[in-house]
Image (cartoon, helix red, strand yellow):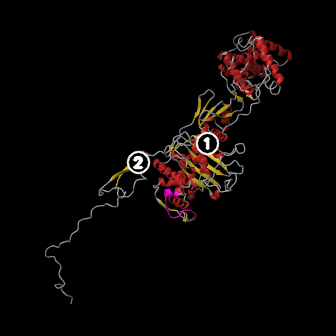
Amino acid sequence: MRRALLVLASFVLAAALAGCASVVDIEVADLGLEAVDAPTQSHVYAADGTELATLRLVHREPAEPDELPDVLLDAVVAAEDRRFFEHGGIDGRAVARAAIANRRAGQVTQGGSTITQQLAKNRYFPDAEETLERKAAEAHVARQLEAEMTKDEILSAYLDTVYFGAGAHGIVAAAEAYFDLTPAQLSLEQAALLAGLIRSPEGASPYQQPERARRVRDDVLSAMVETGAVSRDEAAAAAAAPPEVRDRPPSPVTRHPYFVAHVLRELRAEPALGADEAERLRLLYGGGLSIHTTLDPAVQAAAEQAAAGFSDDEDAPEVAVAALRPADGSVLGVVGGRDFEQREFDLATQGRRQPGSAFKTFALVAALERGWRLDSELASGSGSLRMDDGQAWDVRSATAGPLSLRAALAESSNGAFARLALEVGGDAIADAATELGVTSPVGTHPALALGALDQGVSPLEMASAYGTLAAGGIHAPPQAVTRIENADGSVLWEAPDERRIAVDGAVAWFATEALSDVITSGTGTLADPGRPAAGKTGTSQDHRDAWFAGATPDLAAAVWMGHPDEARTARDPATGQRLEGGGWPARVWRQTVQEALTDTPPRSFPYPEHLEQTVEVNPESGGLATEWCPVTEEMTGLPGELPEYHCPLHGPPEPETSTPRLPSGAEPETDAARPQDR
């Protein structure tokens, strides 16, 4: 390689000094060179296009040639390469002048590099040692760039690769960093200052060295007068102003950091973005990506305001909220805790806590899938129940006597649901939870029905599961990113459609019917948002966790409250009362839903008309009509709504009865005629 470059060097320099228009016919690929892509910051956007975050290794934005004003191009050419528009990539005069200087010094002290050569260096040799061989290869690449690009394209690409100080890589970042402007908005004196910073970005910094910054700017203005780009009067007027720059720009602010952190965790695990996590991170922070997410600023604001309304006391229980769209799983809002700077751990998506009675919903679904009806009755009192393995399960219940399945859910009866769990089995409850959207391992003990899990669940999981019921049994996995675009605007990745049928539509309908009762007349009345809604309260042992999870057809959300680092009772800091799911969590849920759906008309949960059946019934008894019923009428409904018994009032007619007659001569003997025993 070194020998090849030495040979090439002699050809290149000789050709350059001779003013030749072309060099030897050697491709860049023949030298084993690969362009080094300059890292470009990426951006994260909300669903409405609002920027949420800037991801960057360096502050750099690409520029298009038509974005660069003439005053800027004139300043850069005057400062860096006055014969730029005349040479073909190599300036023979400059090379000759540099060669003489280097020969006298006995080492490379001048390069005579053109802007095109500097672009070649920045692209292909960013960290290479300053040697004759490198200069030769650089010159060769410059010739090829001149053959493939226009002068404006070369200037634009060059200004994209330059470091201007203050953390700004490229002219777009520099204009923003120093003046809070776009390149197109730069004045003459501002353009001259930036052009002067190219050779000494830190040594002439207007922040540390304002006088030197002024001198380099004025030198560029003088050079522009010599090239004829500006008049002496224009240069003098520009030089009269001190170099005014904005205050040091702060680091980019991340809006809604819990949500953005959730997005980045998802993308760091996305195989389509790289073979390993390191490669994915390089792409995310240096690939110039546009990451479009599902976050709805209105929903996010509603959740944040509702959570903040509880308490800002540092010792108060934390509040976590996860909200999504049932139809497609789009994550619309995330409140992961009180303060991201103090606690980056996301309680809404990473936190897993015991859900209490909010898990009874999955026992309900398991029962409905196995033929139970909402009017099926269960004993509901306290008792010592016998499990399949013979062990006793002592259950305390605030209810007593028989309750329908529907009423047992509304009243959150532990006794009824413990008995239901023994009937359907813990594995069936776990399966129902998994089908609906719970991804954490929860175990298979019947106590699942009361919210005693092997491992807790996150608010996002619970919101997803309740959203599945709201969507008529169609589960859409939570999705926070819709698509990712490259720097050129082409789509690099798009979210797949992974919706699936989780439960039968009739089961989902009956579940939402029962869960609606929880809100209208059960333990969750404080959650009533004034529109069709279904949900369930939950309070874990010793009131360590308080939940409300629920959904409308347009929004599913789960609220958790508790102490994330301690197993202690959660209390209302204002009253000292123990938190329960039907209290503050229900209030936070209601406020989130009401505010988020202010402009969304109320609508009912999807009724599965395609599953309806029509039967003949007897209007007097309400049972299925028989052929002997004198009057019948049609009844249409879902299988779980229609009667399962036949009319008991009308049956086949009684057969006619009469005294049987014996054949003539067969009459029985009388006692008088009967022989007596002797």
Q: Could you tell me which quadrant the C terminus lies in?
A: bottom left
Q: Tell me the residue that label 1 is attached to.
A: 302
Residue 113 percent location from the top left of the image: 76, 17
- Mark found first going from the N terminus, 2 or 1: 1
Q: Which residue: 25% across, 65% down?
A: 655
Q: Is residue 516 visible?
A: yes
Q: Quadrant of residue 651?
A: bottom left
466 in relation to 207, above or below: below
Q: Tell me the residue that label 2 is attached to.
A: 612
Q: Disc 2 or disc 1, which is closer to the eye?
A: 1
Residue 374 percent location from the top left of the image: 47, 55
Q: Is residue 306 magenta?
A: no
Q: Is residue 263 left or right of residue 612?
A: right
Which residue is at the front of the view, 59 or 15? 59
The magenta region covers 394-409
Q: Which residue: 32% across, 57% down?
A: 626
Q: Secondary structure at mark 1?
A: helix
Q: Amino acid at mark 1?
A: Ala
Which residue is at the front of the view, 499 or 417? 417
Q: Quadrant of residue 354?
A: bottom right
598 in relation to 388, above or below: above
Q: Is residue 674 left or right of residue 318?
A: left
Q: Secondary structure at mark 2?
A: loop
Farthest residue toward the bottom?
A: 678
Which residue is at the front of the view, 66 or 426? 66
How dense is the environment of label 1, judged by Cα within 10 Å: few (below 14), some, or many (20 and up)? Answer: many
122 in relation to 480, above or below: above
Residue 194 percent location from the top left of the image: 75, 22
